[in-house]
Amino acid sequence: MNDGIGSKTPSGQRPVLPRLQTVRTEWTERQRAEPKTPKLHELPVTGPVAAFFRHWQLPASRDEVSQVMRCCIRNKDGDGAARLVKALFERDGDAGLTLRLGYPASGDEQGPLADDDLKFLVRWINEWMPKTPGGPVALDLSGNDLTAKGLTRLCACLRVNPRVRALDLSRNRFLTPALSRQDTASKALRRKLTSPRCPRAPLRTGDAIGELLTSGHLRRLWLNGIPFAREDRELIIRAVVDKRTLCALGMSGCALSEADIKILVQQNGSKGWRHLALGAKLTQGALQSITALLRTSKTLVTLDLETTEPYSLLTVTELFRALDGNHSLKHLSVAGHSLRGNGAAVTEVLRKNTCLRRLDMSGSDISMELLEALVRALSRQEGFKPNDTLTTLILPEFAPGAVDHDKTELIKAKISFAISRNRASLFERLQANALTVFAAGRSSACTLPPELRSRIVGYLQDDERALRSLANQVRKPDLAPEARATPKTWQEARSPRS
């Protein structure tokens, strides 16, 4: 009789061996519960990740915050990510919270997130979100390698977390399906004989994004820089039309057609668009739809028409004329186009406009007539009131060897001087308003009125130095002379009674 492992009992049945599944499950749960902070020898020597984990120094820029957050998510360090978000919330004092996990276009040492990293991120959001103070949350996942399969996990997360109101999926390269390979007759026959089940159709990206809009409480969705297929683009636009709460949409670089832009623009009456990014090679029909939106909309704040398509000619005369009766648009981008138009009409509209704050013309081929029109609109001339509300004007870089290089440099200097004048006067007004609020009894930047906070962030969002200077003055206002404490002498400071 064989007494080995495979031997049978006298009853003729094999003995039941002890299973190790329970022990393995307990070990897995224990390992999952333990914090997985990266060891010091595993950290890089320099950079924002090393500064945060070695010296607990908070990252300064958005890209650095994203790099540290992606490091925490990839190492499954939920405590480190929560500590970083809490510290940034206390430092910035913002009513809204943004979880920055975007992978920049230039890249960094942490690399983009994939679907496997999204598993831990979803579990961390579900555990951590109830512990944070109330307020809307924005989730930035731009530039990563997420697929439609990973978005299904994100749908369940948005369904149970109604505070997530904004989602950025721009520049996710794997959201576009790869081209299917054509099988030969022998491969098709082999698959048919060896696989009795019918092949499952892959999940379409349009269906996954439509499920995101259906299951969540999103008000902002950014999909810039993803060249969707025509079928996916139609599914996404259909889901956007059905989502009544959506008021911000970004689809620049998504190969939008004239019919797509017309459908999206016509939804302003039911949605009240606040932010739209429709960057494409604009046809005459698409431009007519956009100008009609500008004439009728009372809620649109940002209109982004930036494109990367070559030879995109845009005549901006009608676009600027549509701003004559618009009192809501603050940010306009026409970057990447070959800009032409009537300089006199542009000058007249910009002189009368008191709402536009930011105009982006970067990367464009702008005519000399439009440059001179900008100078005339911003300069103080006898008998004309200049535009004093435009605080950000981004011009393209001109080649040093151009024919009119000296003239363009002189024009840029005049425009820069006028913009600096507008920003200085605006900063003085905002500073006076903020100090007036604190003189009324408020004690911190978090207690500023929402309209004043939105004005500060909206006007100075591109100037981090000015924004931080204003925040420091607001948080630490100058005390009145009677409220200042008399400094102690060194004997009083050393005395134990004091």
Image (tube, grey):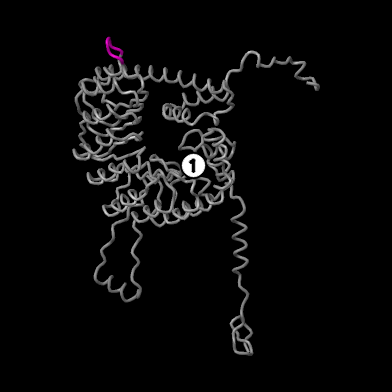
In the foreground, 4 or 325:
325
Residue 378 percent coordinates (x, y): 30, 18
Rendered image quadrant of residue 454: top left
Quadrant housing the C terminus: top right
Q: Quadrant of residue 319?
A: top left
Q: Secondary structure at mark 1?
A: loop
Quadrant in the rendering for residue 372: top left
The answer to if 392 sits in the magenta stretch is: no
Above or below: residue 230 compared with residue 346: below
Reading the image, the residue beneath label 1 is: 136
In the picture, the quarter occupied by the N terminus is: bottom right
Which residue type carries mark 1?
Pro
Find residue 403 and report its horizontal and vertical position in percent: 20, 21
Q: Residue at x 26, y 43 (%)?
A: 261
Looking at the image, residue 249 sits to the left or right of residue 159; the answer is left
Left or right, 80 with reference to 302: right
Dot 1 crowding, Cα within 10 Å, few <14, some 14–19, many 20+: some
Q: Where does the image place residue 91, in percent across and percent down from the top left?
A: 55, 33
Residue 361: image location, x then y, percent: 29, 29
Magenta residues, dominant SS class: loop
Q: Residue at x 45, y 53 (%)?
A: 154
Q: Which residues are magenta?
A: 380-385
Residue 14 against residue 215 in the figure, above or below: below
Residue 297 or 64: which is nearer the viewer?
297
